[in-house]
Amino acid sequence: MIVRIMGEGQLRLDAGSLDDLNRLDDELGAAIDSGDDERFRAALLALLDAVRAAGTPVPDEELVDSDLVLPYAEAHVDEVRAMLTDDGLIPESRTS
Amino acid sequence: MGILQRMSMIFRAKADKALDRAEDPRETLDYSYKKQLELLQKVRRGVADVATSRKRIEVQMSQLAGQADKLQNQAAKALELGREDLAREALTRKSGLANQITDLQTQHSNLQGEEEKLTLAAQRLQAKVESFRTRKETIKATYTAAEAQTRIGEAFSGISEEMSDVGLAVQRAEDKTAELQARAGAVDELLASGVLEDVTGTAKDDITVELDRMASTNDVELELARMKQEITAGPSGAAPRELEGEAAAPAEQPATEPTQEGEQR
């Protein structure tokens, strides 16, 4: 399984670490729904740490799709929420 | 995987949209490669922009630190001359500068982090672009248009995903740099307007003027005292005796101090 951390690149993870990630992803989803940036940041950092610890970086020259994508560490909860709405990842949507 | 899966779907959709699919997939490969090279240029420019901002902040930090040093020296000098009020003023201004410096330090480490990330992103993208080029040439040389379609697959979406990500990273770096440049501009203005320069710069500020005035008054008083002493020493007062007297005077003080300490105990 390939996971991309935005701005950092891709990591390869065993399917075995999925359970942990699922649990952390649930918390991230709940944090986004709550709109609480502190809670969101804690959940995001926990998830990023778990992915970094369990994964091996994909070599630079390898061209491969990601199965999962994680926001970058400094992302604000509102930013990520905006990414998840229909406008998607287009930065200009923040100004509207 | 709720959020993560949704994000990857959005990513893929965006990457797909970015592809202008031509009739012949081999043309699409060339077009995409051109876009990749453009993006690589953009990322490198981004790295250079961030580095420029970082250097500008470094210059400002050293200017402010220099001014803080001057104020510290002024405070010491003022205290020596017994002017606590002036010393206090100098230290107050210095603490104002210290806040500015702390703020700049934060910005500086922000930019450093951004620069590192972008530099790595540029390296990553370059390696991927190079590997895409090799793959593209192989596909073009080996397959017909129809066959190429099925061979492009993951190489294509892989690079598109990387391009989306790097594109967004550059955008974020540019936003951050623009924001910091506006703030750096404000510090430049502050430095140039003389608000800070007046305190310590080449043009004499109020503290310096006061210290200079006091120093010269002090010098005059000392000179006068010395001259008076010469006169009162009388005609027989030969120069050697006076020198002995001067040399003896400082030696007396340390001698008395231990006695005082002894009495206190």
Image (cartoon, coloured by chain):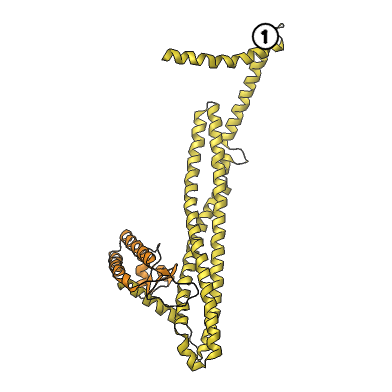
Chain colours: A orange, B yellow
Secondary structure under badge 1? loop
Q: Which residue is mark 1?
A: B233
Placement of the N terminus of chain B among the 4 image quadrants: bottom left
Q: Is residue A54 at all visible to an observer of this figure?
A: yes
Residue sitting nearer the eye, B84 or B34: B34
Q: Is residue B195 at all visible to an observer of this figure?
A: no
Residue sitting nearer the eye, B243 or B13: B243
- Within the image, what quadrant is residue B141 found in? bottom right
- Within the image, what quadrant is residue A7 found in? bottom left
The answer to whether A48 appears left or right of B131 in the picture is left
Residue plotted at (55% across, 63% down): B49
Q: Position of residue B36 (x, y in %)?
A: 53, 77
The answer to whether B95 appears left or right of B223 in the picture is left
Residue plotted at (56% across, 71% down): B41
Q: Position of residue A70 (x, y in %)?
A: 38, 69
- Within the image, what quadrant is residue A1 found in? bottom left
Q: Chain of mark 1?
A: B
Hey, what amino acid is under mark 1?
Ala
Relative to B243, residue A8 above or below: below
Residue sitting nearer the eye, B240 or A57: A57
Residue sitting nearer the eye, A47 or B216: A47
